[in-house]
Amino acid sequence: MHPGRSCPLHYRYAPSVLAREPDLIAETLYVVGGLYGNRPALAALLDLAAREPGPVTLVFNGDFNWFNVDPEGFSTINRQVLQHTTLRGNVETEIADDDDSAGCGCGYPAWVSDAEVARSDEIITRLRAAARAFPALRERLAMLPMHLVAEVGGVRTAIVHGDAHSLAGWDFAQEALSDPAHRARIASEFAAANTRIFASSHTCLPVAHEFDTPQGACALINNGAAGMPNFSGAHFGVITRLATSPARHVEPLYTLHVDAIHVEALPLHYDHTRWLEEFLANWPAGSPAHASYYRRITAGPAHTVLQAVRSPRKLQTTTAINRSSPTNDIKNE
């Protein structure tokens, strides 16, 4: 088995650990997963937050490193992200540790090819080597928590990197949520974690699902990736916004509601040309990251907004994604 499929024991926790008192309280909160070392996306995120009419809390929930193997890129991403509330993903966990037995620590499920897993292990090896030039940053990454509990407008939100059980879990992946029995198990975990909202990332493709539970309507939202395209033909990332009022400065891709809380997926429009130049400078043709990600970065994955939203009656709009597609070929059927 490739080490990238393994899930180390120290990645695991019980949903009940999330039933604690909130770690932070906010009226507007951004959950930013999967930045993947994209500096233009980080700049766009900070600009987006600055345009909020009131204060906004940024929570980076892991894998803000990945492609940034150059010294400047590694230093810039980590120093800026660590100024905010930050969780570690499997990437940060692995590059902060000299033990490479878990590979990238991605915990890949069976539907991911062995070739993809092997390339991810090659990427983390190179990123770990780059990180060794920054021992102080590695020490800070190692100390980051795996999960966080926030209260937004009186509603509890559990913010994780993977799922309710593991830092690198795939239970919140859009593929897994296609199974009704799996969804029934997830529904029970809201009560175990004493939360109404789960916000995650890790699995790279966005999904938003509403659950009917004894506590009332609950929401699971996975932002996919802030630093890579998430939909076919598009060149932007996605972040999660949780707030007591709807976004006015940017049109959400879709919205769920939990009581009075707006659970929104926001497009993150970064400088695609600059990002592609930075990516190719580190990962030219023939490199493992180029083989795995170049097509997604330039054309987006085979994924649409309506595949991401699992509660159609709550779909607020898809016009934002249609306007922002560089090829205007997003399929909405």
Image (spheres, helix red, strand yellow):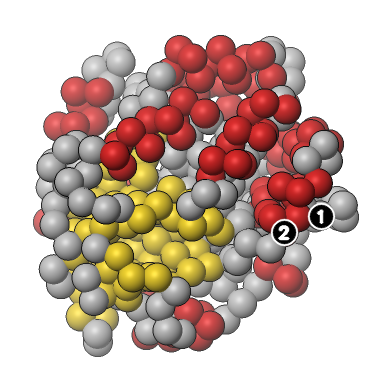
Residue at image coords 56%, 59%: 87
Please tell me how crowded label 1 is: few (under 14), some (14-19), or many (20+) other residues with Cα within 10 Å.
Answer: some
- The location of residue 129, given as percent across then percent down, is 83, 36
Secondary structure, mark 2, is helix
The residue that mark 2 highlights is: 142
Q: Quadrant of residue 77?
A: top right
- The location of residue 290, given as percent across then percent down, is 65, 21
Regarding residue 208, the answer to whether it shows in the image is no
Regarding residue 271, the answer to whether it shows in the image is yes
Q: Earlier in the sequence, mark 1 or mark 2?
A: 1
- The location of residue 102, given as percent across then percent down, is 80, 55
Say which quadrant the C terminus sits in. Answer: top left
Residue at image coords 67%, 48%: 91
- The location of residue 60, given as percent across then percent down, is 48, 51
* 62 to 280, vertically: above or below: below
* 178 to 45, vertically: above or below: below
* 78 to 218, vertically: above or below: above
User: Would residue 169 be found to the left or right of residue 46 on screen?
Assistant: right
Please, what is the three-letter code of the amino acid marked with disc 2? Ala
How many numbered marks does the figure carry?
2
Residue at image coords 45%, 12%: 273
The residue that mark 1 highlights is: 97
Please, what is the three-letter code of the amino acid marked with disc 1? Asp
